[in-house]
Image: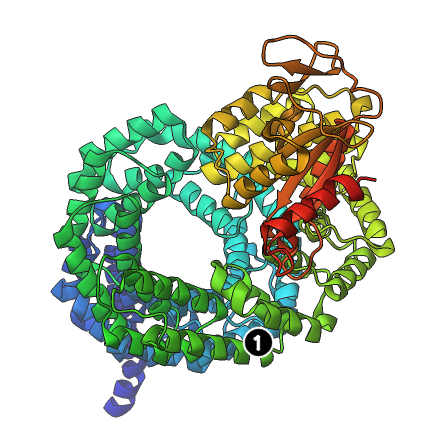
Amino acid sequence: MFRLQALRCYPCRVFNYMQYGAMCQDQVLAQIKACTAEDQVFDVVGKNKAKLSVKHVNCAVHLLWQFQKNRPQMLRTVELTRSHPQFLTLCVLAENKISLMDDTTVVEMLYGVLRLSVEPHDSLVQHLVMEAWSRQERFLMATLSKFSVCLSDQNLYHSPIMGQITEIVRQKLDTIDDARVLTTLMISVSHLVSPRLRDALIVKADTLLDSMDPFHYNNPRRIVQFLRNIRFMHQPLLEKCNHILLKNVPHLDTENISIILGLFQSMQYDNFAFTLAAKQRLMELVDTSTDALSFTKLFVALVPLAGHATRERLENAALLLAEELNAQQALAILELLEETQCRNLQLIDKIASILHKNLEVYGPVEISKMTQSLLLLHYQNPELFSKLRSILLRFLQASLHPYEVPMLSRVISMLPSLHVDEAIIARVNAMVPQCSLNAYSSITVAIARWIRNDPTYRHSTPSKYVLLLQTLKRCGQTRLQNAERLDAILEELRYISGEWFEETLLEETVVMFQRLVEQVSWANVPELAVYLTRTSYRCETLLERMANVAFENMHKIHYSGTYATLLPFAVLDYNSPKVDELFDACIQRLTPHIRSFEPHLLVLLAYALALVDCFPEEVIREVFSVDFLAKLDAQLEMMPNALNMRVRLRLMELNRAVCLECPEFQVPWFHKRFCQQLQKRSNNLVSPVQQQIQSMLGEVLGGINCARAAVLTPYFYTVDFECVQDRNQRAIPYSEPSQLQIDEDGKLRWESGSGRKESTGLPPGARRIALDFLDSKSFCKNSQHMKGEVQMKKRHLEILGYHVLHIPHFEWNSMELSTQDTWKEYLKKKLFTELT
């Protein structure tokens, strides 16, 4: 009976014990949740080691990360937390209890310990990753999204685990209805997406953007980052993201503005509205950015956009804060000083001294950027450069990455040295077969510098440099001959610079384009068009294919893409019935969106149209409206100097073209002062060929005073040589210097040096002749066809009353014209026979 009573009482005791244990555990959990600092968490952990469950450990790790997250970056104490003995206790307990964790806890624990800087090779991290990998097929998409972030934190972008996540995303994409989950996954899998999955992700992201809270600006920011990662300019999605980001500018801090501006810049996505709003917001944040971290981000984001006074103020502030900068912040400021061509020597010296003290913490890319920036800033410190050279050489010898070796060799070549170590050449030579076409271009720049600086180099004998160039050419030809994807090759060609590639591999590149011509699509036409324009290569088969594809798919091409699409046809002066249809289709496509264009892009587009004598009234009236020019001025203030000058020149040339070819638009000529300033800054050097022609013209025409050189016309064209012939083709000598001027009525008059106004008309039957020498830049690369700008100048000079003659370089420098007599005979034929 007693045994039965005992058995009856046993469940009660067990139940009471379990209830007591749960109560104790709940008390521990409540104590952890009540903590307000790390020390309190560690105190609870230390007193209750034996009682801690999975829930307690997870809660403690999560809370420790929240404490750090809620502090400014400068005040975080991650290192102290990670090195605390009780944190090690938490890690040991977590590792022992992995099998007891549910799916969400496994990922949250991994996320927390990584945020607290536990190393990826730590056994806890590795066990958590393996456990999550074994379960990821059944993860909720939100959990999978967080797990993908953990993998990205460990640089496992190309791992089998990330490959499986990419496949899960492909299969379950339709089930994702949270923009945050989707955009996080998009960034994580961006290195592995196929074109089909890329397009599906873009469609899904576009849909979710419409339904999400517009103040969640991190979602569109992540979409822009995804597009940057995959190097894909999807203009409609970018515009939608930009629209949301623009609304949120008043709420953005310096860090987020800096990130977004950096993303847009790396994508070469020009956005005047966002840049202007960001500039205004950054100006508001200047006074609150007083610590080194926030000031560095403000400095890097604002200085390129700011005026002279603001730049000077920020440079002075940087000088005061310099001692507080860490190694990375000092490097960021140095790169910005180089980008803006800073001349504040005191600030440059201060930043350089910080870099000098921290050389051991930098990696290959950072040391390369530092060396290049210091050299371009003309910084003088032989000791520092000697150390940098040693570090660069060490990195070069140890590097296994194809992108690092060309970069390191190019930067090493910038440093002064009379001898190039054989080991450098051998290392570069060994890595060449693995490099991209863009890397070949960098290596040739380095070789050119080495040749210039090496006194042992002999042009007459083969050398290590010649052998390396031959290897580059051979590998480049092989790469082009084996290319199977046009888009991949266009990506490699995007940033190629220098003359070597064009002189050595341009023909092979065009042959490759023709072989892959069926892969030309509406999506890659703008990229291909930019390449042909940059190289000035006039391949009619390729241009005709591009015109057909673009015309048939004009509704798919973004309106801003019409500029790049039209550019090669205008610049290379290629015309055909299909090209005429393409221009008409482009004008119809862009006209409804004229006011949505970036101001500088509309100017460039209008100039490209003007090259081919095309002046759409809607475009011209928009460009020369007061409101548009005010927007353009505001945008130009925030542009780099080179782009700023290019846009100003194009606006001037467009203004000139409209005044001469479309007087009915009544656009005034307002670039006289700008052109006068350009004339003052120009060196006006006369080439040896022009001097040679000038002396012979005097003999051919009957006197040196029968021709003038470097004549400035109205609207500031420069004519190499000018002469006047009477009705009998006899040269009329100039009695005194004269120049064609525009009077107050807009009429052309010839004015003598004494100020006397001559008759607007020449003697009956006489004609004024403009003779221009055309060098190789005036022609397409592979032909004797003149470029569009030369044709436009000819049209304009004819409107001004000139008879225009050209002396092409390939005629003047030909074998047929190799003596004084043959050159004179050539000039006589030009002046007296061709005109007739």
Residue 628 shows in this picture = no
Along the line of sight, the residue nearer the viewer: 702 or 723: 702
Looking at the rendered structure, the kind of residue marked 1 is Leu
Along the line of sight, the residue nearer the viewer: 207 or 751: 751
In the image, residue 538 above or below residue 130: above
Q: How dense is the environment of label 1, judged by Cα within 10 Å: few (below 14), some, or many (20 and up)?
A: some
Left or right of 386: which side holds 565? right
Tell me what residue is drawn at x 69 percent, y 25 percent.
624
In the image, residue 448 above or below residue 517: above
Left or right of 457: which side holds 46? left
Quarter of the view holding residue 753: top right
Along the line of sight, the residue nearer the viewer: 160 or 620: 620
Left or right of 169: which side holds 199? right
In the image, residue 789 above or below residue 30: above
Which corner quadrant holds the N terminus?
Answer: bottom left
Which corner quadrant holds the C terminus?
Answer: top right
Tell me what residue is drawn at x 67 percent, y 42 percent.
789
| Residue that badge 1 annotates | 480
